[in-house]
């Protein structure tokens, strides 16, 4: 049994321990109170710069005001949160961001400071870094309206106040911060590619292939060894040749692989275009990856359970369902002076055997010059002329019109092409109503799909496999089989069919992407859109 003396001694020791533990807690409370007062004064001083935009100050004022200016980074037990923030900012380069943008050095310098003024500054800088980092990694660094007039996508607005509240409540701030990056699988693949190409750059990049005559299979040339080393450095060639100067079959396959993933004709001949692509520095490819990562931050994470994705720069269309491509095909896009815009829509119906109603711009730019060059053009192409655009406009006889006297700006006629083998829209058009009058459609010019660069349309998108696409879109209706589709088309009658289920359509512009088997694809900047983003991001 414990003696009375021992009980008194234990009680005394317990009281002493409580007093000693209360002292630091009281000191911390005083420190936190001082920081809170400094925070309140600092945020109230409109003359003191807080962030680069008014939204930061407003959000910080509301957030801290609602919590009585109680700190969230330097409060008791919160020190590890600040260190986690620092670690995330230090690794921002993995997402193509610059850690110095977020005041990392200033935050790190104040981590061990004890003065209330330093602690208040640390608190503000940490919250500000959180806002800026989340905004950059989630919705992008650029104001889209200032970059490209043909960008019609709308990144989601970052709710700064909500972000601060969720960060304060997050049990794992590091995971919370990393979750701000897009979860879109295309973006995450680009992030992996960025790491791979930075590793290549860190090892000195890849060697150049000297200028000279075209290298062809079977040739013996000293430059073949340079070609071999270049392709090994990028992973296109994995085996060494018996004679490094001989352009052997294994090297031919590696060149064809390189050509395919760079949008070149895979003929195995290293001509001027292939040589130019081989000699693009790895640093330029890294910039290209960064540009495309920024571009995907502008897109929603959720593109849809199933959707149509058109890559204008890659001249490809994919139908994606549950994350997997179920149908793919080549496309023809707008000419470089009639660029197809970037936007998203929702496809709701299609038309078999469509009429083609020529837009006023195309009528002025294309149709009128062809009529002037060939008076029989309209009849040969199955096109009719109407007095105006009203539903009751009278049809006119083209031979009674004095075409040479018409100025393009005064052309008010409506031109309509009947369904048939010459119809510019082919046998099917796919409609996702939009203000640009852009849609997907078939084409009688099938030979264009064999071209490597396919910029031939007036802005709409011509698809290589229209019947396969129609069959997929109508598969929710058992009445629409492939056989019925072919019968309707053969009948020649125009028919509008509402889709059983509408589907999102995303027109994108990706000059870098990861294909099947992890193959990294690069494409030329056909519309100059990469150049606009590069100017905004890098000043070049």
Image (cartoon, grey):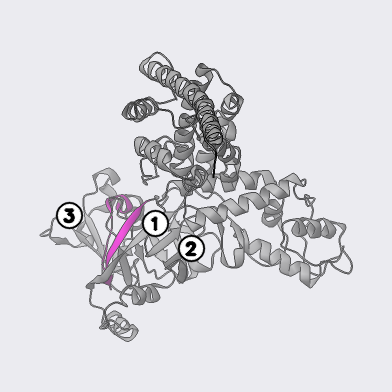
Q: Check if mark 1's residue and mark 2's residue have beta carbons within 8 Å.
A: no
Instruction: Report the Cα–Cα distance between label 3 and label 1.
Output: 40 Å
Pick the front one: 199 or 104 = 104
Assign a secondary structure to mark 2.
strand
Q: Position of residue 144 (x, y in %)?
A: 41, 39
Using a 10 Å C-alpha cutoff, classify the residue at mark 3 as few (fewer than 14 neighbours), some (14 to 19) or many (20 or more): few
Q: Quadrant of residue 463?
A: bottom left
Which-is-in-front pick, marks 1 and 2? 1
> Is 81 positioned to the left or the right of 40 in the image?
right
Q: Answer whether residue 47 is magenta in the image.
A: no
383 to the left or right of 452: left
Which circle, 2 or 3, is nearer the viewer? 2
Discs 3, 1 touching: Cβ within 8 Å: no
Q: Quadrant of the N terminus?
A: top right
Graded by Cα atoms within 10 Å as few (under 14), some (14 to 19) or many (20 or more), the crowding at tag 2 reads: some
Q: Which residue is mark 3?
A: 389
Is residue 354 covered in magenta? yes
Q: Are marks 2 and 3 in contact (CB under 8 Å)?
A: no
Could you say whether the residue bearing mark 1 is in a helix, strand or loop? loop
* Residue 422 x, y percent position in the rendering: 35, 71
Near-viewer residue (360 or 459): 459
- In front here: 333 or 405? 333
Magenta range: 343-363
Res. 441 visible in picture: yes
Q: Residue at x 53, y 27 (%)?
A: 16
Mark 1 and mark 2: span between their CA atoms? Answer: 20 Å
Q: Which residue is mark 1?
A: 302
Is 99 located above or below residue 29 in the figure? below
Observer able to see residue 540: no
Residue pictured at 42% horizontal, 21% vertical: 33
Residue 266's place in the image compared with 173, above or below, is below
């Amino acid at each position: 049994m414990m003696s009375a003396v021992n009980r008194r001694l234990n009680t005394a020791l317990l009281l002493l321990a409580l007093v000693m533990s209360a002292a630091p807690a009281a000191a911390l409370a005083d420190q936190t109170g001082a920081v809170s007062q400094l925070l309140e004064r600092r945020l109230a001083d409109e003359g003191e710069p807080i962030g680069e935009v008014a939204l930061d100050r407003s959000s910080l004022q509301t957030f801290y005001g609602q919590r009585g200016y109680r700190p969230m980074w330097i409060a008791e037990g919160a020190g590890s949160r600040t260190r986690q923030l620092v670690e995330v900012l230090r690794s921002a380069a993995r997402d193509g961001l610059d850690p110095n943008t977020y005041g990392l050095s200033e935050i790190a310098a104040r981590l061990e400071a004890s003065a209330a003024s330093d602690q208040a500054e640390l608190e503000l800088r940490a919250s500000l870094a959180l806002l800026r980092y989340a905004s950059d990694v989630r919705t992008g660094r650029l104001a889209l309206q200032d970059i490209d007039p043909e960008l019609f996508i709308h990144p989601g607005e970052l709710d700064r106040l909500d972000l601060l509240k969720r960060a304060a409540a997050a049990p794992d701030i590091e995971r919370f911060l990393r979750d701000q990056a897009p979860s879109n699988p295309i973006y995450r693949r680009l992030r992996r590619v960025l790491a791979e190409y930075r590793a290549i750059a860190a090892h000195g990049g890849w060697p150049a292939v000297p200028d000279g005559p075209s290298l062809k299979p079977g040739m013996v040339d000293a430059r073949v060894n340079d070609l071999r080393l270049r392709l090994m450095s990028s992973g296109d060639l994995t085996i060494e040749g018996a004679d490094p100067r001989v352009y052997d079959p294994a090297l031919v396959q590696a060149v064809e692989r390189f050509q395919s993933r760079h949008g070149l004709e895979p003929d195995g001949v290293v001509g001027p275009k292939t040589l130019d692509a081989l000699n693009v520095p790895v640093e330029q490819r890294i910039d290209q990856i960064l540009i495309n990562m920024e571009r995907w931050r502008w897109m929603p994470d959720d593109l849809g359970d199933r959707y149509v994705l058109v890559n204008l720069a890659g001249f490809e269309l994919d139908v994606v369902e549950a994350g997997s491509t179920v149908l793919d095909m080549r496309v023809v896009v707008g000419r470089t002076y009639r660029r197809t815009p970037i936007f998203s829509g929702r496809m709701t119906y299609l038309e078999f055997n469509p009429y083609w109603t020529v837009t006023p711009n195309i009528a002025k730019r294309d149709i009128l010059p062809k009529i002037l060059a060939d008076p029989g053009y309209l009849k040969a192409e199955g096109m009719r002329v109407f007095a105006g655009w009203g539903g009751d406009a009278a049809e006119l006889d083209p031979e009674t019109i004095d075409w040479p006297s018409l100025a393009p700006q005064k052309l008010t006629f409506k031109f309509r092409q009947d369904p048939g083998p010459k119809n510019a829209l082919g046998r099917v058009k796919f409609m996702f109503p939009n203000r640009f009058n852009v849609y997907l459609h078939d084409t009688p010019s099938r030979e264009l799909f064999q071209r490597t660069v396919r910029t031939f349309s007036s802005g709409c998108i011509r698809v290589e496999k229209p019947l396969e696409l129609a069959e997929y879109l109508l598969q929710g209706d058992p009445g629409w089989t492939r056989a019925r589709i072919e019968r309707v088309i053969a009948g020649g009658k125009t028919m509008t069919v509402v889709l059983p289920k509408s589907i999102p359509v995303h027109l994108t512009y990706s000059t870098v992407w990861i294909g099947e088997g992890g193959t990294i694809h690069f494409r030329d900047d056909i519309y100059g859109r990469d150049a606009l983003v590069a100017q905004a991001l890098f000043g070049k």
